[in-house]
Every structure is written in C-alpha cells, then in structure tokens.
Amino acid sequence: MTRRPLSVRGIQKVATTILLVWVSVFALLFYYSLNFSIAISVADSMITSGLLAAACICLSSLLGYYQPKDETILFVLGLTVVLALIITVISKVALHALFGADLTYVSFLKLSLTVRFIVIFVFLAWCALASILWYRLEDQSATQERLLAAQNLYREAELNKLRHQLQPHFLFNSLNSVYALTIVNPKEAGSMITRLAAFLRGTLKRDDEVWVAVREEMEYIQLYLDIEKVRFSHRLNLDISVAEETLDFKLPGTLLQPIVENAIKFGLYNTSAAITIVMRVYMENDVLIIETSNPFDPEMKATGGTGFGLSAIKRRLYLLFADENLLGTRATADNLFITTLKIPQRNDQDIIN
C-alpha cells in the first residue's frame, strides 16, 4: 500500500514546524506592521493557516487515491484554484463574523482577498506538485521491489531446476556404468549398486541445501569417487589435497560432482591406461579455489555427451554471483585438462539461500 506523505513521522514534524512558524510570522506581521490587535492578528493567522493546512491534507490524500493519467497538470491547477477560492471565502466569512465591528480591519480584509487567494493558491499548488512527485516515487519504488522480487523468484526457480536436473543426469550416467560393469565384472556390479544407493540417499537428504561446507561437499564427492573406483578399479587413481583452513568455507551444493565426472569421462573413457585425477582446494584472496586436472589424449575424440554438467555449473554461478568468469578450463602443453572453479566468500547476509 502506498504511504501517505503525512504518515511519515519526519514529514509530520517538518510540516508542524512550518505551520507554527507560518502562524507566528503572520501574527507578528499583522500586529507590528499593520497595528491590529493581538486578537485580530492571532485569529486571522490561525484561521487562514488552519484552513490552508486542512486543504493541504485533503489535497495530498485525494491525489494519493486518484490521479488522472492524462492532463494531470490541468487537473491539479483546477483543483488548487477551487480549494484556494473555498479557503479565501471561508476565512473572509469567519473573520468578518468575528471582527466585523472593526471597520479598519474589514476594509483591509476586502482589499487583501486577492493577495490571500494568490498566496493560498501558490502554496496549494506547491503542495500538490510535491504530493504527485512523492506518489510517483513511491510507485516507482514499489514497482522496482516487485520487479526484484520477481527476478529473485525466477532465479531461485532456475537454480532449483538446475540442481534437480543434475540428479537424473548423474543417475543416467551411473546406470550406464552399472550396465557396463555387469558385462565385465558382474560381482562388482552389486557393490556399485549398493554404493550408488547410498550416494543417492545422501543426495536426497541435502536436496534443500544450496550452500554447504567444503568438508560436506568433499564427503559427497568421495561417495561418488567410490562408485567410480568400483568400476575402473586400478585404472583410476586420485590425488586429493584440501587445505585445512578451507573446510568450513561455503560453496553451492552438488557443484563439484559434474566437474569430477567430466574429468573421469575425458581422462578414462578413451584409454585403457591408468590415470591420476588431481584435485586441489585452497584459498586465494578470500576466494575459494578448486582445481581439478586430468590427462587427455589430444588425438582421440572424447565420448559424446550433452555438455550439460559444466554449462549448468556456469549458469548456477552466474545466477548466484552475476559473474561469468568463475569457471575456467584450459589445456596444458603436457596434455592436462584443468578445470578451475572460484567461489567468492561473502558475509552470510549476502549469500543467496
């Protein structure tokens, strides 16, 4: 709901101060400059100023409920002219009824009607324009808040979609691995299915966790690597190094598994030799760095895939940090494919949950 200007405590204080100063100045002007009595000076100032204040409140409230889309200026000018005439007439009648016996004041009252009308009109016009500006700024602020809320909802929905898509993506690849293992080593297939069930059970438990500690994510990755070790046995070697100071830092959940899966696919699928996948987790300038490297044969084509894993990671990182450069890949001269993941560490209030 749009706030009214006079509902703001700060504006109420300022408006009250201006009204008191206005009444005091005009009362003193009537008393000292025009030599009217204290009663006439105070009554004239209070009645005129009171009616003007009441008109400003009504005008501001009316503009809060209704503003024409077209010809707003003409509407406001017409409204202020009518209100200025009403205030001028009411103040004249009231003051004449109170001090009609004072012919000097009555004569002054008649002569000053035009000036009073102009002053009241200018004040009301200023009040109307200030109110219109206030309400339009309030509308813009409300629109901006709704837009940001909609963007946040869209971003959260897309994040959830990406996270949930990773589960069937991994599951399909794991089932292919189980199928292949049943052919070459049926005995180990049962062990792999058991580990896969444990892995998926852990996935379901952390389904609602967007941010997890490094130690939790590495335990999750170890479950996945245990599954792959069953399939590839001695061909898959791991060299994992996690700096002690990084264990309690946060990163988006289930972010590393597609990277490790990618390293295994490009490192092992097209070779019968043993390979070593290296993972390094460390801090650098308040940024969590996770490097994963795997050897590859530049002369052999990788097994076809959708490329969903790394693209999903890039999209998630962009939605969380609005930065497209947090995931990088490169190939070295000695045929190592290196994936570098950077996770800026922020205060808790800055992290999108």
Image: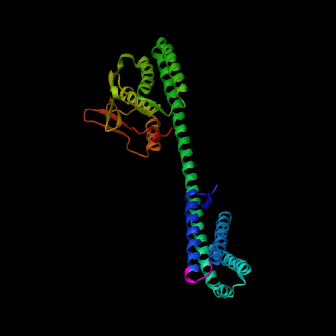
The residue nearer to you, when weighing 60 against 260, is: 60
17 up-or-down from 343: above or below: below
Was residue 47 drawn as part of the magenta stretch in this picture? Answer: no
Q: For this view, does 25 lie left or right of residue 87?
A: left
Say which of 228 and 45 sits in front: 45
Q: Main secondary structure of the magenta part?
A: loop
- Going by the picture, which residue comes out furthest to the left? 333
Out of 159 and 104, give the one closest to the viewer. Answer: 104
Where is 188 relative to 69, above or below?
above
Q: Quadrant of residue 154?
A: top right
Residue 257, how many percent across, how many down?
Answer: 44, 29
Of 237 and 270, nearer the camera is 237
Residue 34 drawn in magenta: yes
Q: Residue furthest top?
A: 187
> Residue 328: which quarter of the image?
top left
In the image, what residue occupies the spot 64% across and 66% down?
60
Q: Where, by quadrant of the figure, is residue 4 drawn?
A: bottom right
The answer to whether residue 146 shows anywhere in this view is yes
Tally of numbered tags: 0
Name the residue: 43% across, 17% down.
230
The reply to whether residue 278 is in sight is no
- In-image side of 159 versus 128 (left or right): left
Q: Position of residue 335 (x, y in %)?
A: 28, 32
Whole-percent x, y for residue 142 in the image:
58, 55
Question: With respect to residue 55, does 170 lie above or below?
Answer: above
The residue drawn where x is 54% and y is 34% is 164
Q: Position of residue 172 (x, y in %)?
A: 52, 28
User: What is the magenta range?
Assistant: 32-37
Q: Is residue 205 left or right of residue 309?
A: right
Quadrant housing the N terminus: bottom right
- In this picture the colour scheme is rainbow
